[in-house]
Amino acid sequence: MSNIILLDGGMGQELIRRSPDAVTALWGGAVLRDHPQIVGQLHQDFIRAGATAITVNAYTFTRPRLARDDQETAFDEMQNRACEIAAGAVDETGADAAIAGCLPPLNGSYHPDSVPPVEEAAKHFAEIAAVQAPFVDVLICETMSSIREAQGALAGAKSAGKPIWLALTTDDEDGTKLRSGEALADALEAVKGAENLTAILINCTRPEAVDQAMPILATCGLPFGAYANGFTKIETDYTPGSTVEKLSTRTDLTPEAYADFALDWVAAGATIVGGCCEVGPAHIATLAQRLNAAGHTLVKDFS
C-alpha cells in the first residue's frame, strides 16, 4: 500500500454555487473578494472531508486577468488574502494539512494561443510565487495547456525556492496530448530536470483522459498523480474572459464514480490525487474513505 497526498477539490464552481451573487469572469476570485467567509468555510469542508493538502483560492488573481476586470491594483491584497484565508482554515480545523500555492494560466484556461512568451510569463509567475511563498509548502503550476506555458511557469516559480508541482491539462478526448496538441511525452521531456520540480500531475480534464495519461506520467521519474474535472467537455467558444455559464456539468460523475477513477490512478502508481472543477467535498470524502479502506495512508507530503 502507498502513502497518498489527497488534494482538495475544485474551489471555483463550489464557491459560485454557495455565493449569493451572479457569476463573473473572476470565478471564485469574486467570491473571495466579496464573501471571504465562504472561501474559508469551503477550505475547512475539504479538510474535514479528508484532504491533506489544500490550494489557495488565487486562480484568477493574475495581473492580466485582474487588469481585464479593471482591478489590477488589487493584486497584492487579493493574493495575500487568499493565502491568509487558507492558512486560517488549517488553523481553524487543527488539521495537519499542507497548503499549496496556485500559479494558474495568466490570461485564461485551456487556450495555449493566449500564452505569452516564456520570459514575459516568468516575470508574472515569479511575482505570484513571491507573494505566496511565505504561506505555502509547495507551489502548483496548474492547468498548463502547452509546453511554453509550463516552461514560463516553472521559470518564474523557481525563484521562490519552494518545491514545485507541475499540473498539465490534456485534450478531453486524447489524454496523450496537451490542449496545445503537443504530445504529453514531449512535455515531460521538455521540463525534465527543471529546478525544484518535485511532481508532475494532470488536472482539469476529463477523468477518462487522465486514464490515458497515467502510463505516460509513470515514466517521468517523479511522483505523479491527477485531479480531474467534472465538466462534460471544454467548449470551443470558452475563451479567456468567459464565465462558467459556457460550461456544462456531468451528471454521471458521482462521488463513488470519481473515486473509482482515482483508485485506478493510484493502482497505476499515482501518489497525489484530488479533484478540480465540479469535484466537491462529498467527492473528496468518498475518495478519502475508499483510499483508507484500501489500506493506503493519507499524508500531507512526501517526507
Image (cartoon, helix red, strand yellow):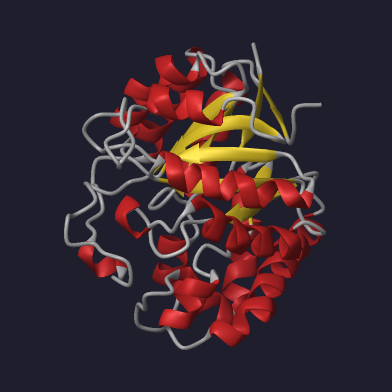
Q: Nearer the viewer, residue 264 or 284?
A: 264
Left-right relation of 168 to 120? left
Q: Can you give x and y, in whole percent of width and height, for residue 79 in the image?
A: 66, 71
Nearest to the observer: residue 82 or residue 47:
82
Quadrant occupied by the N terminus: top right
Percent across and percent down for residue 286 are 50, 36
Q: Is residue 286 above or below residue 302?
A: below
Answer left or right for 158 relative to 260.
right
Which of the 4 image quadrants contains residue 196?
A: top right
Q: Residue at x 45, y 73 (%)?
A: 65
Q: From the viewer's perspective, is residue 67 above or below residue 168?
A: below
Where on the picture, by quarter, is residue 303? top right
Instruction: Single out the residue that lies furthest toward the left.
Output: 236
Residue found at x 62% / y 30% = 199
Query: Which image quadrant for residue 138?
Result: top right
- Please give the name of the residue rendered at 74% of the width and 65% of the height, measured from the top-left corner: 131
Of 65 and 257, the residue lying toward us: 65
Side of 161 where 223 appears, left or right: left
Is any part of residue 274 visible from this angle? yes
Relative image position of residue 166 (x, y in whole percent):
56, 38
Would you say residue 260 is visible in this rendering?
Answer: no
Question: Which residue occupies 30% across, 55% down?
Answer: 113
Q: Position of residue 180 (x, y in %)?
A: 30, 42
Q: Judge by depth and name the residue closer to the eye, 32 or 260.
A: 32
